[in-house]
Image (tube, grey):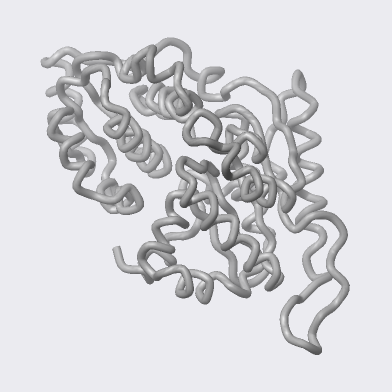
């Protein structure tokens, strides 16, 4: 994917094409969900009061912080709210995962990415994660420049901004950069249960060889489907940058994965998480044999610094291996 293709792809996934604040249904057992809707609505209501840039074009900045940060567990509707906010933003705006923005910087260079994104009304960042110090400093600098030019920031994550990087690198050495990120956001906590688990009970479905071939054949007859060995898939993912996984799933209706096993290599696991995210965004059904996909991440991995990433991927795999995945 070229830089222009990456930029053109910075829109909400198709499963959130109809997401609005009105059709987000808060769980009555968790008042923070309704409160989050109100805060997102208030954040959107401040557009039009500020246009930055230029020696003679400055106006009074809008009240409140230039960013909003939706913090909560997976499956509480953070991405739905982020997509709904993106729709309410006027003018030029962008929506992407954290890894897509870092890939954009890699494709265009830092100056090129700043030039492209500057002047946007909103930069929406889904799945905000800082897995290495280089990304920490780069994203802090990038957001600082964009905020100074009048761009507003909205982000989602499973980790509060002052805890980003914990368990993955020496966060204390980068406290200044992490604090600078946190200072730009109004933090909105969203509690609740994973809606995918509410809708779908049980575990990821693992098929025997006969059922796998039968269902894969039906899927191929109805649309575009692929079939790959799990080990071969992992080896191929290692040759492609995760920002380009979106092209691997483009146009697919289903994928078949034979011989799933529990992962032991952290790099393989993180690449597989990135692939699962793209499959989920595109709502591609997953058919698999071998170890059930909700057990693909071992206990040692689930006890480490990437625990929340792995649990989010597990939740999504449970949904995608069901005959009718929940959006």
Name, please, the residue furthest toward the front.
173
Say left or right for 206 vs 52: left
x%, y% of residue 122?
Answer: 64, 62
Q: Residue at x 69, y 33 (%)?
A: 25
Say left or right for 141 vs 305: right
x%, y% of residue 248?
Answer: 25, 48
Would you say residue 97 is visible in this rendering? no
Vertical placement of 29 versus 171: above or below?
above
Vertical placement of 46 versus 314: above or below?
below
x%, y% of residue 226?
Answer: 17, 38
Q: Residue at x 13, y 29 (%)?
A: 229
x%, y% of residue 213?
Answer: 12, 23
Where does the N terminus fall, quadrant-wise? bottom left
Given residues 89 and 313, the one toward you in this image is 313
Would you say residue 161 is visible in this rendering? yes
Q: Residue at x 17, y 16 (%)?
A: 211
Name, please, the residue furthest toward the bottom.
56
């Amino acid at each position: 994917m070229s830089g222009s293709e990456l930029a053109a792809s910075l829109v909400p996934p198709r499963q959130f094409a109809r997401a609005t604040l009105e059709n987000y249904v808060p769980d009555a057992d968790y008042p923070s969900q309704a409160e989050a809707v109100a805060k997102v609505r208030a954040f959107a209501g401040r557009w039009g009061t500020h246009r930055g840039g230029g020696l003679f074009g400055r106006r009074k900045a809008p009240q409140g912080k230039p960013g909003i940060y939706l913090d909560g567990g997976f499956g509480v509707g953070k991405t739905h709210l982020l997509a709904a906010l993106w729709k309410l933003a006027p003018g030029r705006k962008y929506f992407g995962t954290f890894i897509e923005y870092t890939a954009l910087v890699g494709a265009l260079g830092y100056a090129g990415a700043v030039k492209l994104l500057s002047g946007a009304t909103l930069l929406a960042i889904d799945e905000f994660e800082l897995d290495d110090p280089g990304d920490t400093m780069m994203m802090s600098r990038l957001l600082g420049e964009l905020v100074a030019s009048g761009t507003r920031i909205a982000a989602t994550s499973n980790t509060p901004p002052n805890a980003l990087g914990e368990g993955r690198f020496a966060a204390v050495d980068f406290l200044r950069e992490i604090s600078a990120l946190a200072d730009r956001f109004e933090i909105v906590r969203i509690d609740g249960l994973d809606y995918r688990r509410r809708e779908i009970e049980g575990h990821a479905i693992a098929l025997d060889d006969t059922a796998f071939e039968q269902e894969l054949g039906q899927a191929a007859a109805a649309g575009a489907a692929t079939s790959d060995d799990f080990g071969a898939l992992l080896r191929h993912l290692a040759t492609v940058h995760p920002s380009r996984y979106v092209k691997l799933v483009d146009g697919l209706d289903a994928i078949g994965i034979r011989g799933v096993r529990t992962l032991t290599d952290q790099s393989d696991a993180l690449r597989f998480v990135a692939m699962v995210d793209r499959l989920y965004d595109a709502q591609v059904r997953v058919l698999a044999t071998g170890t059930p996909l909700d057990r693909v991440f071992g206990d040692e991995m689930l006890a480490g610094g990437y625990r929340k990433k792995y649990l989010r991927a597990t939740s999504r795999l449970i949904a995608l291996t069901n005959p009718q995945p929940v959006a």
